Image: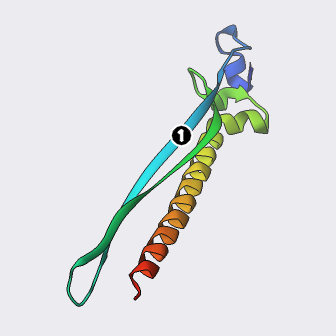
Amino acid sequence: ARFKGRAATVGGRKDTTYVEQSLRLELRAEVAYRIIDPHTRRVVEQGSVNARAAGSLRRGLFAGDYRDLDLSGAERSLFEDEERLATEELVNRLVDDLAARLAECVYDRLLGLIP
């Protein structure tokens, strides 16, 4: 990458390098639940549900201030947005999957309790 503005003239350095990392992420979560009879306060059912989500992300690493580099929008996103957005998307997928599994499991268990 090239330095921009004043940073390009300080110390005579005009070119530099940064590292682009590609990472694989995996998130796992477990929710434990209890279904309690409100009249007897007895636990009528309990269990847990697991979910996982996997994805990848890219990020940029630079020893100095990346804002001193003359980067394109896509290159700049490696330092600013890419990691955060990829992580948020992965967490959202995990939560959605966990919620669906929990709803299905609890619904099935409650139906089984109806005489």
Q: Residue furthest top?
A: 12
The kind of residue tagged 1 is Glu
* Residue at point 54%, 52% (across, down): 91
- Would you name the residue on which mark 1 appears? 26
Tally the marks: 1
Q: Position of residue 112 (x, y in %)?
A: 43, 78
* Residue at point 57%, 57% (across, down): 92
- Give the quadrant of residue 37: bottom left
Q: Rate crowding at label 1 as few (under 14), some (14 to 19) or many (20 or more) other CA atoms within 10 Å.
A: few
Lateral position of residue 58 relative to residue 108, left or right: right
Pick the front one: 69 or 104? 104
* Residue at point 47%, 68% (across, down): 105
Q: Secondary structure at mark 1?
A: strand
Pick the front one: 89 or 9? 89
Q: Position of residue 9 (x, y in %)?
A: 71, 16
- Give the quadrant of residue 68: top right
* Residue at point 50%, 44% (across, down): 27
Residue 81 seen in the current view: yes
Q: Is residue 53 above or below residue 19?
A: below
Lateral position of residue 83 relative to residue 105, left or right: right
Pick the front one: 88 or 79? 88
Q: Is residue 31 above or below residue 9?
A: below
Q: Which quarter of the rendering shows the N terminus?
A: top right
Residue 33 seen in the current view: no
- Give the quadrant of residue 73: top right
Q: How is the image coloured?
A: rainbow
Q: Which quarter of the rendering shows the C terminus?
A: bottom left
Lateral position of residue 69 relative to residue 24, left or right: right
Q: Position of residue 20 (x, y in %)?
A: 66, 25
